[in-house]
Image (tube, rainbow, N blue to C red):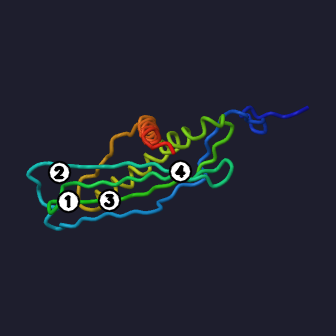
Amino acid sequence: MSEANGNGAGAANTGPQINTLGQYVKDFSFENPNAPRSLGPQERGPNISVQVNVNAQQLAEQDFEVSLKLDGSAGEGADTLFRFELEYCGIFRVTNFPADQVHPVVMIECPRILFPFARQIVADAVRNGGFPPLYLDPIDFGALYMQRMAEEQNQAGSRPVA
């Protein structure tokens, strides 16, 4: 008689899976170039700018390193309050997805998993720099992916044919 514990352990799981094998800060920089002058009361809120970029590199048949890059600043020029650059990465194992779905899964779902951790790193760094924490709004990685695919299609369509 076989024993089962009811949690499915031991049963072959053939459904699609994303497993996080590791997460880490690959590169991080925070600058407070005008401190202590910048720490005083501000007449108005600073112009906050944040850029997001996602890249992936295949490490093995099912393993991918996904890099989420966040570059941001508050203020401009001589009135810059702070700047940050964060490259936060994860190693993901993507199994049992159809081949045509692996790329979207890696470029949409994996950064979605990483984002809350990167967001907290930025918020803590800004707070530790002497400012109120910067809580980044959620990011629609699906829309970013679609935009990037459209840009690549436009570039491919505008290339001269030899």
Where residue 92 sits in the image (x, y, percent)? Answer: 59, 49
How many angstroms separate mark 1 from mark 4 (CA)?
A: 31 Å
Residue under label 4: 56
Point 52% across, 44% down: residue: 110
- Seen in the picture, residue 123 relative to 150 is either above or below; the reply is below
Point 29% across, 57% down: residue: 126
How many angstroms separate mark 2 from mark 3 (CA)?
A: 15 Å
Pick the front one: 132 or 56: 56
Residue under label 1: 81
Residue under label 3: 84
- 14 with respect to 41 (left or right): right
Q: Amino acid at mark 2?
A: Pro
Neighbours of disc 4 within 10 Å: few (<14), some (14-19), many (20+)? some
Q: Residue furthest right?
A: 1
How many angstroms separate mark 1 from mark 3 (CA)?
A: 11 Å
- Seen in the picture, residue 31 relative to 140 is either above or below; the reply is below
- Seen in the picture, residue 124 relative to 162 is either above or below; the reply is below
Residue under label 2: 46
